[in-house]
Image (cartoon, rainbow, N blue to C red):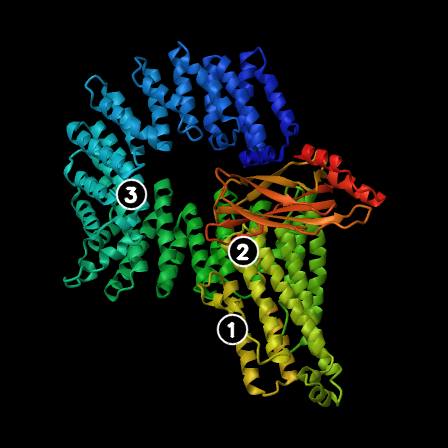
Amino acid sequence: MASSVKSFLADAGYGEQELDANSALMELDKGLRSGKLGEQCEAVVRFPRLFQKYPFPILINSAFLKLADVFRVGNNFLRLCVLKVTQQSEKHLEKILNVDEFVKRVFSVIHSNDPVARAITLRMLGSMASIIPERKNAHHSIRQSLDSHDNVEVEAAIFAAAHFSAQSKDFAVGICNKISEMIQGLATPVDLKLKLIPILQHMHHDASLASSSRQLLQQLVTSYPSTKMVIVTLHTFTLLAASSLVDIPKQIQLLLQYLKNDPRKAVKRLAIQDLKLLANKTPHTWSRENIQALCESALHTPYDSLKMGMLSVLSTLSGTIAIKQYFSSAPGTAATTARSFDLVKLAQECCYHTNRGIAAHGVRILTNISASCQEKDLLPLEQDAVFGLEALLVLCSQDDSPGAQATLKITLTCMVKLVKCRPHLSQSVVESLLTQLQSAQDNARILMCHCLAAIAMQLPVLADGILGDLMDLYKLIGQSATDKKQELLVSLATVIFVSSQKALSTEIKTVIKQQLENASNGWTAYRIARQASRMGNHDMARELYQSLLTQVASEHFYFWLNSLKEFSHAEQCLAGLQEDNYSSALSCIAEALKSYHKGIASLTAASTPLNPLSFQCGFVKLRIDLLQAFSQLICTCNSLKTSPPPAIATTIAMTSGNDLQRCGRISNQMKHSMEEFRNLATRYGDLYQSSFDADSATLRNVELQQQSCLLISHAIEALILDPESASFQEYSSNGTAHVESEYERRMMSVFNHVLEEVESLNRKYAPVSYLASNTCLCNAVIALLKVPLSFQRYFFQKLQSTSIKLALSPSPRNPAEPIAVQNNQQLALKVEGVVQHGSKPGLFRKIQSVCLNVSSVLQSKPGQDYKIPIDNMTNEMEQRVEPHNDYFSTQFLLNFVILGTHNITVESSVIDSNGIVWKTGPKTTIFVKSLEDPYSQQVRLQQQQGQPPSQQQQQRTAYSRF
């Protein structure tokens, strides 16, 4: 906790004076120029923090040139510090603009008489290989240093050679023979050979180079049979095959051969490790024979550690396409039963092994087979998997050791996967979990509660009958206040919220509150309240938020909790809605809106510059507008009863040919209402697109809100405005996807029910009865509002954080000051950007490319009014760039033909690896003032005075401009 607070304070800039980029660089430069070695070293090691804070090329270029100067003139310790900084800041190296100057200053030390200085320089060159892959002088120095008599220098040369081989094909081709001579040479010591061999893993730039390296490694494996040599050579062999791709099947066979025939355990372990690497990287290259050979080795080995390693490879393969290839019978052979396969025999044998790790892998293999293979003869394996899982659950839930907990996690993950693919097994799995929950250790109970909640979110398998057992356990746990008990209280409360699908009974609420008062801290109570909000138990959440209001130390936290309390109260008001009672529905919605407005005021007060709560504010504002739209729709429907259409309405409709006139003024109100719901759906879509960092459950929740708006607009159109042409849009097709939560299940049920009602009304009444239509619409609104809103994780917690920082050049000194450009010239606008991540980059989705949109708008014209040719008057451009090491840059060429002040807006959005566009921002604005060029101005003034320009002056001006 302390470390997270420290990092938060560091990120926020607390505890150190905020400086702009130039001041920070000057501060470090002062340290570099100091006469004291300690101050110089301190200044050097602070550079990575500077790069992190100001990651743009102009600063990084200056900083690296200063570091190169220190490297050139400093002692070896300073050089070592600069080397470490360079290695830490590897992703910033490509932002160095003066690469030649930087390399020149560093490279000058290679001619030193001190072998340590030369060694540090070689390591420095190796670390910079990504920006200077084809520098011949660096290549030559590395080749020379490989022949040095100083071991430190030779090791540094090997380091540099490995890095350059990975980056440069020319260097790899040139050095390959040199490396092979040194490895095969009798004068080279064995420990040096062991360091040289791994360089060959980078010889994958073309097929012939890879083939020659492979032949050399093959010779080494047979010529040097010592354990160390075989291990290093085989591992290099594997990495070379994994990079060159073409030799992977041969490599799998070679590793299996060593696994089977080599008696040394160290070699077998290495073979297993490399097989695991290939199973993760290229499972599709594993043939049936490969898997069969691995099964045979696992069945026959007497060593548990080796058996566990082989099962680990098989369990990895069982979750991929390889398992289907294994079970598909070869053409021309009779299909055998599932239980006769060696893989199945092995898994069944291992399920009840005395070693927990082996048993876990056996169960995992059976689970993966049951989940991925749907053939009838594989169905009996389901039961084997369930029995194995239950046995492991009993074994691990009683043991508090870390190994048992790791095995239990694997077991519970397999349970969730099995129940998801085979719903009919859910009852027996849940019963075994509930039985063990009573007697398990606390650590195991927490994990089992998570598993129960995960299963119950997918399938409604937890009946109200089990609540009694859960409440007894809750009372028992609440008597202790240790950290584990607090965690368990939260996990168990989550299961209780999930299992009680309807509102919580008073008794349950009393027990939960009582236990929280007895033995918990405020944080536990907040976490339970948060879970109640996610599960739609708003009455419980409101009471907990209320109790926490006076326990926080900051006014921002107070306002945050107060807003959550108001939102929970608002949603609780909507829980009392009843069908066909529209007046009470209006009063409930009005009461909810009142609380929501109080809540949004508190939420705005809770936001800070560092945490603006933009998603939360956007989500709540949309909810308020949606409730107002629902209220307005019910009022509109009621107005048909209070002010029905005039008697001549039908005649007017027939005369005008507009059938909508039959229901009087309500038609315009309905049209307005439909447009409002469509507008809300668009706004929900915008909120979805701006939530790049949200988890999938939150995004699905936003999508369901959008679909409910589209559903009501469709119902209005189908029942009243245009019954013939109405059709529900493509959003409805998402309903067939796998339902992930109870909230989604209930919403989809309402959607389907409303659609059926609308269709049946359309068929029932030829000209649709407006009273029936209004009843249907009001009931649809009430049905949607009766489903308790779920406030998902992203509302409370941001697990992934991604932001983009843009820098434009040219940029004015003062943001309000325009950049001057002549109207006959074009402005080259350079846009640079940095992608900044939080602690878990790419947790939900990753940035594939950044889309930059540049547009310009004329803001003000000059005072004088004269004609200018209007072509290319607007600028609207878009470019996509792929960030490299979280940095991107591109240029736009803009025309400003019309004189005056132009407003240029640069907006960025990101495209993820699935090709979906997310409007993350930011949006940056600069001003450009377009000025008339002097020659045109002179010609215009002369024309206004009635004097034709002299030919000589014209020629001179044109010549000078040229």
In the image, residue 905 lies at what x, y percent?
Answer: 66, 46
Q: Amino acid at mark 3?
A: Leu
In depth, the one of 271 and 430 nearer the eye is 271
Q: Which mark is residue 698?
A: 2
Relative to 356, 521 lies left or right: right
Q: Residue at x 73, y 82 (%)?
A: 664
- Residue 442 visible in rendering: yes
- Closest to the camera, between mark 1 and mark 3, is 3
Q: Is residue 515 visible?
A: no
Q: Report the residue marked by disc 1.
A: 752
The percent position of residue 374, horizontal first and vertical second, equals 29, 63
Number of other residues with Cα within 10 Å of mark 1, as a class: few under 14, some 14 to 19, many 20 or more: some
Labels 1 and 2 touching (C-beta < 8 A): no
Dividing the picture into quadrants, the one containing residue 328 is bottom left
The quarter of the rendered structure image containing the C terminus is: top right
Residue 575, quarter of the rendered image: bottom right
Q: CA distance from mark 1 to mark 2?
A: 22 Å
Instruction: Look at label 1 and name its amino acid.
Output: Asn
> In terms of depth relative to the viewer, which is nearer, 391 or 585?
585
Contact, CB < 8 Å: mark 3 with mark 2? Answer: no
Mark 3–mark 2 Cα distance, whole angstroms, equals 39 Å
Say which residue appears at 74% left-offset and 35% top-offset: 952
Q: Secondary structure at mark 1?
A: helix
